[in-house]
Image: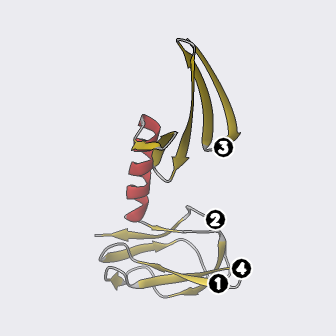
Amino acid sequence: MHLRASSSQDDEQLYELELQAQRYRFAQIHRDTRTHIFYQRWHTPYLTGHDIEREQSHEDQAQQAIAPLNGIVTALHCQAGDIVEKDQPLLVIEAMKMEYTVQAPYSGTVSTVLYAVGDQVAHGDLLVELTE
């Protein structure tokens, strides 16, 4: 048995397996929080240990006011001490002339606003700390 692997992109691995004089080619691709195996017309998604960690990380981020992209804060709709409802606008980020409104992931009290209007934020930055 011989296995040869090559990578064409960061999230894609191509494999060639030789087993009993037969050659099999398949691809392993990582998309979102899943890993997919493609062989001829057959496809199956599965979770690896790394995928499970990424999926949990996405779930954790969904419970926080996190910057969804790089940009500049153009408006604040809350301040420390405010009581907010789920999906209430907290602030606005502008990137490439498009605006994105960051909403409260759950009802609670704003404990800290970590950025001011005009501040640059990076994807994944915690923007507003909330307490339930």
| Distance from Cα at disc 4 to Cα at disc 2 | 14 Å
In the picture, the disc for residue 122 is 2
Q: Is residue 32 left or right of residue 109?
A: right
- Tag count in the figure? 4
- State the residue position of label 3: 10
Amino acid type shown at disc 4: Met
Foreground: disc 2 or disc 1: 1
Number of the front mark, 1 or 3? 3
Residue at 45%, 47% in the rendered image: 34
Q: Which residue is mark 1?
A: 98
Q: Is residue 122 left or right of residue 77?
A: right
Task: Compare residues 32 and 129 and report the one nearer the observer.
Answer: 32
**CB contact under 8 Å: marks 2 and 3:** no
Labels 4, 2: front one: 4
In the depicted structure, whether residue 111 falls above or below residue 3: below
Question: In x, y percent, where is residue 130?
Answer: 38, 70
Q: Secondary structure at mark 4?
A: loop
Task: Give the mark nearer the N terminus: 2 vs 3.
Answer: 3
